[in-house]
């Protein structure tokens, strides 16, 4: 099957208001170039998503008609197959403003220098086109660019710092820059971020671009007052202090996960109160969580601090974060009791406080966590009985309370029928396995091993779990399982 071409063409000429005149608004040479470009491809009509629409649109491309009236000249979805060579008539379209060739395999190995001729281009998207080799210096000629996306081209290399520097110096109106999964390992982080001083930038995405070494941030690094979204995740060898982003006060999305940053949160992010998405996971961020800053994040929907070196207690200040849906403190050095305010977040769907030094008791009664789908508190030193509310949440899918010090009986009021994963192993639970547990027909993984459970259980009851993949009951010395001879349900326990 041929690759699907999603092509967006927009011309300066076509954006002018039509007059009542019957004269064509489209230049004849542009019409001719488009027709020749069309002829260089086949339409993949077998593509159910785009093929029929493509055929209908391109069928309007007829000689002798105004190309500004052709369907798709401004927004075209074409199931086309072929190659774009340096001598393609596409490069004759000098008035081209928007070009989207994303998710195709339409190039020879390297990005043609001919793209530098599109001097009127404001939007260029070549993402996932599998272009290779060094980024041509001609790209710096595109001084009118507002949006540039070269992402998902792993073999596209930025070798010359001067190419990137000139591009960012010339494109003074650039608002969106997406370089995800291109190769910038040849450029020093200090040089790269010194170029990113365009005050017009609103969104920057630099995921997995291979930056390595010390970032050496200062007060002016990424100090961009209009910046709203910054993605820098998966630059695994990028080190140094957290970027000082306090002057980028418009930031709503910040993802600098899976790097090697260190430092204190309050020192670098104190003014970022408009955040809706914050991920610092997989770094070396230390210190305590600043209560005053946390209370200011009223718009936050995701907070991920997992895999860092945070210490101290979790502040009991989350009551005002009513929009929070995901909260992840996994794998830090946090201690003390889990604050009660975490259990009063009405929008929360994912809570992970696993692999810390948390202790104490869970609250006995909770009525507001009705949207929770995942609760991971494993690998702590929590104690007391497992509260019944944790087994009766209506949308709960994943529950992991393993490797704690819980005691007492498993609640008989189990009603979380959406549960697929239940891990209560490695505690000190006592008594029988309640019959209500066997009503959790969606369970795929059940671990009750290494407790003090007792009594008799008919193994045939486990046949209710039609999707069960893993069952562990071992290390319960007083628990007896009755295997009936006529049972045809076999599973290793």
Image (spheres, rainbow, N blue to C red):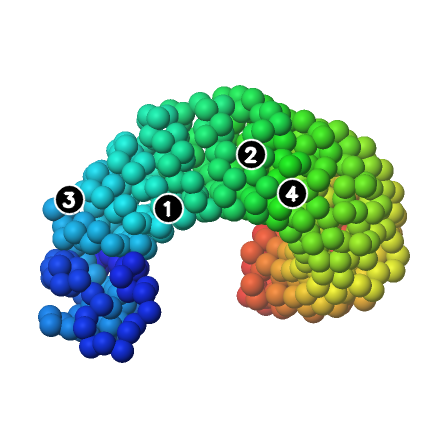
Residue at figure coordinates x 66%, y 36% from the top left: 246
- Alpha carbon separation for disc pair 1 and 4: 24 Å
Q: Position of residue 219 (x, y in %)?
A: 62, 27
Q: What residue is shown with label 3?
A: 86
- Alpha carbon separation for disc pair 3 and 4: 44 Å
- Alpha carbon separation for disc pair 2 and 3: 36 Å
Q: Do the residues labelled 2 and 1 touch (CB within 8 Å)?
A: no
Q: Where is residue 456 in the image (x, y as percent from the top left)?
A: 77, 59
Residue at figure coordinates x 78%, y 37% from the top left: 290
Compare residues 453 and 108 and report the one nearer the observer: 108
Q: Position of residue 200 (x, y in %)?
A: 50, 43
Label 3 Cα crowd, 10 Å radius (few <14 / some 14-19 / many 20+): some
Q: What element carries label 2?
A: loop
Q: What residue is shown with label 4?
A: 249
Q: What residue is shown with label 1?
A: 145
Label 2 Cα crowd, 10 Å radius (few <14 / some 14-19 / many 20+): many
Label 4 Cα crowd, 10 Å radius (few <14 / some 14-19 / many 20+): many
Compare residues 330 and 142 and report the one nearer the observer: 142
Left or right? Give the position of 162 relative to 295. left
Residue at figure coordinates x 68%, y 42% from the top left: 272
- Alpha carbon separation for disc pair 1 and 3: 21 Å
Q: What element carries label 3?
A: loop
Mark 3 or 4, closer to the camera: 4
Q: Please tell me whether residue 269 is drawn above or below residue 437 in the rendered image.
A: above
Left or right? Give the position of 116 relative to 87. right
Of label 1 and label 4, which has the lower sequence position? 1
Mark 1 or 3, closer to the camera: 1
Of label 3 and label 4, which has the lower sequence position? 3
Any part of residue 438 in sight: no
Any part of residue 201 in sight: yes
Q: Where is residue 23 in the image (x, y as percent from the top left)?
A: 18, 73
Q: Are marks 2 and 4 in contact (CB under 8 Å)?
A: no
């Amino acid at each position: 099957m041929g690759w699907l071409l999603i092509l967006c063409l927009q011309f300066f000429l076509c954006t002018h208001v039509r007059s009542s005149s019957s004269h064509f608004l489209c230049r004849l040479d542009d019409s001719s170039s488009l027709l020749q470009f069309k002829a260089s491809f086949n339409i993949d009509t077998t593509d159910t998503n785009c093929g029929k629409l493509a055929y209908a649109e391109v069928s309007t491309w007829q000689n002798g008609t105004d190309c500004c009236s052709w369907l798709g000249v401004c927004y075209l979805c074409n199931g086309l197959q072929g190659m774009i060579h340096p001598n393609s008539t596409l490069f004759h379209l000098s008035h081209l403003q928007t070009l989207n060739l994303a998710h195709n395999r339409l190039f020879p190995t390297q990005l043609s220098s001919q793209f530098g001729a599109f001097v009127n281009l404001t939007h260029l998207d070549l993402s996932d086109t599998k272009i290779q080799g060094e980024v041509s210096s001609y790209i710096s000629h595109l001084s009118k660019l507002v949006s540039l996306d070269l992402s998902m081209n792993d073999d596209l290399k930025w070798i010359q710092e001067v190419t990137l520097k000139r591009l960012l110096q010339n494109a003074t109106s650039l608002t969106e820059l997406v370089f995800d999964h291109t190769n910038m390992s040849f450029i020093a982080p200090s040089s790269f971020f010194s170029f990113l001083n365009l005050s017009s930038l609103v969104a920057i995405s630099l995921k997995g671009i291979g930056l390595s070494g010390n970032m050496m941030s200062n007060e002016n690094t990424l100090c961009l007052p209009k910046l709203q979204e910054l993605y820098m995740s998966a630059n695994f060898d990028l080190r140094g202090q957290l970027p000082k982003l306090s002057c980028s006060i418009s930031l709503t999305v910040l993802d600098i996960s899976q790097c090697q940053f260190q430092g204190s949160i309050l020192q670098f992010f104190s003014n970022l109160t408009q955040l809706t998405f914050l991920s610092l996971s997989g770094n070396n961020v230390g210190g305590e969580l600043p209560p005053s800053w946390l209370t200011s994040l009223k718009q936050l929907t995701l907070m991920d601090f997992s895999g860092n070196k945070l210490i101290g207690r979790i502040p009991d200040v989350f009551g005002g974060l009513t929009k929070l849906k995901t909260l992840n403190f996994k794998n830090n050095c946090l201690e003390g009791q889990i604050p009660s305010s975490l259990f009063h977040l009405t929008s929360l769907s994912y809570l992970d406080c696993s692999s810390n030094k948390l202790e104490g008791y869970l609250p006995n009664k909770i009525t507001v966590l009705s949207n929770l789908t995942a609760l991971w508190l494993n690998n702590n030193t929590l104690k007391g009985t497992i509260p019944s509310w944790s087994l009766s949440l209506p949308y709960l899918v994943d529950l992991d309370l393993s490797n704690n010090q819980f005691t007492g009986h498993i609640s008989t009021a189990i009603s979380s029928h959406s549960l697929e994963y239940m891990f209560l192993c490695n505690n000190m639970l006592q008594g029988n396995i309640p019959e209500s547990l066997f009503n959790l027909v969606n369970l795929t993984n059940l671990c009750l091993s290494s407790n003090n459970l007792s009594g008799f259980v008919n193994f045939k009851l486990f046949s209710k779990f039609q999707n069960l993949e893993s069952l562990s009951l071992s290390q319960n010395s007083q628990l007896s399982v009755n295997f009936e001879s006529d049972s045809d349900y076999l599973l290793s326990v």
